[in-house]
Amino acid sequence: MSAESDISSHLLEPPEPGDERNAFIKLDPPGFFIRHPPKPHLLESFITPDELLFQTIHMGAAVVDQSKWMLVVDGLVQKPFAINLEALKRLPCRTITSLHECYGSPLKPATTALWRIGNVQWTGVPLNLLLGIARPLSEASYVWSEGLDCGEFAGVESDRYQKDLPMEKAMSDEVLLAFEMNGKPLSQKRGGPVRLVVPGWFGTNSTKWISRITLQEHRATGPFTTRFYNEPDPSGPKGAMRPVWSVEPNSMIVKPRPDEKLTSLEVRVEGWAWSSRNDNTVEVSFDDGQSWMGAKVEPRVDFSWQKFSFVTALDSGNYKVMAKATSRDGLSQPLSGRRNHCHSVAFRVTGDAVDAIQ
Ligand SMILES: Nc1nc2c(c(=O)[nH]1)N[C@H]1C(S)=C(S)[C@@H](COP(=O)(O)O)O[C@H]1N2
Ligand SMILES: [Mo]
């Protein structure tokens, strides 16, 4: 049997519209739920363990009946279909290392929640494989994704969490229907049994408890793409808005930790840099951004963050170090005012072990 006919034999006819939502049991916990990330200096490992990874849930965490779960692929396609969990897991899958970053609350200024980030490994079936089976019609321009959660967020009722991706990103090799994170099945709060993962784009696009993929001509109409998660476009005309999609270059200092007293005159600065498409260079400054020195940057794996380090000798005294990432396409972090502005950390060099333990 060819790979294609083998896949086809596992596909189901699409159910009556909306029947895929019968896999939803309840919300637990109901309502808005956030697990804050630890402070940057605690995010030391390249792969962030589940316990240290933030969580953001708007309307409540769906509890899903795995025996009833199916993914429907429909809309502007030649061959709509559904697939159950067992069949999905038998398709060719991929593991991708990627940054995972929350944009922050869509109700507050974008500069209020800056370090809701981690770096994890996702395993799942590439979305483009399923789209290839469904054969998109030429009018299809957006891929909408729907989660099984429903309820209220910020006074707005939604019958489902709904997001969209432009066709180009949806067809890229990296977008996954993931059923594992860091080598373990997705937990209920992480979006299990299956969630969308959109590497390099803000977490809001990675629909948890996914139940339907539907191809459409225009952007999704639910509140999570209309009222929430659009931002001013700095490259457009005044007042222009753009969807919260790709992540701009950013970085965070992990060492020294804020207000740390360093006893050695040799100071080591370390941290993470990331951006949606390319690898980054990183520079550090000890004089509020007047002069910059290049840091060593480790290679990027898939869409991962990259470790940077810089070692220098400093006299005793008070310091502030700042880091700035620049992606290969030339975009740099601004010094202030935007959600990806440069991170800085104040510390003190004593050069004296006795001073440090006081
Ligand atoms: N169905 C659904 N998917 C969702 C959300 C949600 O509330 N419901 N929150 C989004 C947001 S804003 C983020 S940042 C990520 C967070 O994923 P995590 O909680 O697994 O870290 O999931 C996204 N996917
Ligand atoms: Mo988010």
Image (tube, rainbow, N blue to C red):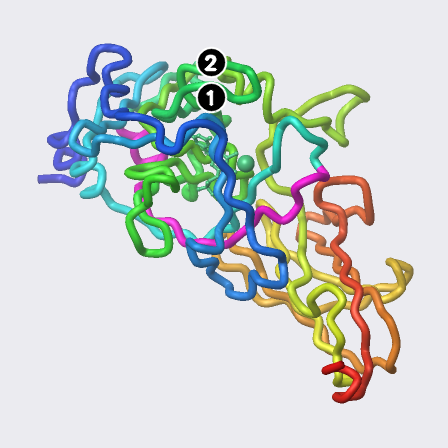
Earlier in the chain: of badge 2 and badge 1, it is 1
**Percent x, y of residue 109:** 72, 32
Left or right, 216 with reference to 298:
left
Determine which residue is flagged by label 1: 142
Front-most of residues 221 and 115: 115
Left or right, 10 with reference to 261:
left
Determine which residue is flagged by label 2: 217
Residue drawn where x is 31% and y is 23% of the image? 135
Whether pointer 2 and pointer 1 mark residues with C-beta atoms closer than 8 Å, the reply is yes
- Residue type at mark 2 is Glu
Give the distance between the C-alpha atoms of the residues marked 2 and 1, in whole angstroms.
6 Å
The residue stretch that appears in magenta: 111-133
- Where is the C terminus found, in terms of image quarters? bottom right
Left or right, 311 with reference to 76:
right
**Percent x, y of residue 240:** 74, 21
Front-most of residues 257 and 6: 257
Residue drawn where x is 56% and y is 40% of the image? 102
Q: Is residue 338 above or below residue 240?
A: below
**Percent x, y of residue 295:** 71, 69
Residue drawn where x is 75% and y is 47% of the image? 341
Q: For residue 175, which quarter of the picture?
A: top left
